[in-house]
Amino acid sequence: MSGTARELARRLWLLLALTTAATCALFGSYQGLLCTAVPLRDTSAPAVLALDTARQALDQARAEDEDPAAGADFQSHLTVVSTSLAAVSAEDVTGLSGRQTLQTVTGLLTSYGNFVQLAHQEPPGPLRTGYLHFAQQVLDGDEGITQLLAGLQHRQRAVVGRQTSVGPALWTGWALTLVFGAALIVALVETQVYLRLRFRRRWNRPLLAACALLAGGVAVLAVFASWTASAYGDVRGALAVGTGDAGRIQAAGKDVARFLAGSGFRAGLAWWVLVVGAVLLGLVAAGLWPRVNDYRFRRTR
């Protein structure tokens, strides 16, 4: 094999190795960041907001449980609580422990409503006071509804925190992506210069296309990743609204939908990284292999 063939082969294998490394690093980093966007939008965020709604309606029911005249409103609020908890259960964000908590709360909620109804049927006196006392114990006592829902909400937000965190592994992945991507661009440019000087041709079109595709693809995905990371921070803030009024919870839901708009499309681009990587490998091979093939049987003089 001639010296020129060895130089061409060395550059070919270097470019193929760097392309493979950059593709794997970019795919892992982008997929790792975007893979939680759709579950966050479609499952976790609705579950958190549904539990906020349940706790807010429960606070309203608590404010009316001692007033027999407000019995209809009390039952209406309990219905909202039950409906919201059913929505939380359907999303199943916290797994088995969450389902068990919700089953317990559902039973306690029935007991709470029954005690309040019995109290409303009694005239003022010890019996009515006793029923209300039992109702308050079910609601606010140890392992009562309020405590159980607060614990469940804490676990929900821990899940959201994990889904929206950009930890050391992701930062390392993006750092490797930038290193391999920069090294690949430098190698492509150096190979272009070498081919121009050695063969007196101004451009190697496949390598030029590979350089443009790499730079453009990494830039676009980096912008999408930056938008997503920023959206994650905004989502965490929106979901920390707590049990305020229903208007605030509704507004938080709209904000989350706006922050994560287009996340499904952006997440789907992760698999196209592998397609683009394969195209880059093909362009590198098309740019150098014909030259290697021409020179590999020539002997050095």
Image (cartoon, rainbow, N blue to C red):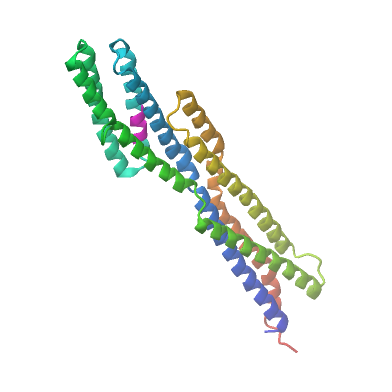
Q: Is residue 224 visible?
A: yes
Q: Look at the image and say whether residue 86 sits in the magenta stretch.
A: yes
Question: Looking at the picture, how far across and down is residue 102, in whole percent?
Answer: 29, 35
Question: Looking at the picture, how far across and down is residue 177, in whole percent?
Answer: 59, 60
Identified at 60% across, 48% down, the residue is 226
Identified at 77% across, 70% down, the residue is 193
- In the shown orientation, is residue 273 left or right of residue 148? right
Instruction: From the viewer's side, name the closer residue of 30 and 17.
Output: 30
Picture quadrant of residue 75: top left
**The furthest residue to the front:** 126
Q: Look at the image and say whether residue 208 sits in the magenta stretch.
A: no
The boundaries of the magenta stretch are 84-89
Is 190 located above or below residue 276 in the figure?
Answer: below
Identified at 71% across, 57% down, the residue is 212
Is 73 located above or below residue 276 in the figure?
Answer: above
Figure quadrant of the N terminus: bottom right
Figure quadrant of the C terminus: bottom right
Question: Looking at the picture, how far across and down is residue 272, in whole percent?
Answer: 56, 52
Q: Is residue 271 visible?
A: no
- In the shown orientation, is residue 277 left or right of residue 186? left
Question: Looking at the picture, how far across and down is residue 143, in whole percent?
Answer: 26, 36
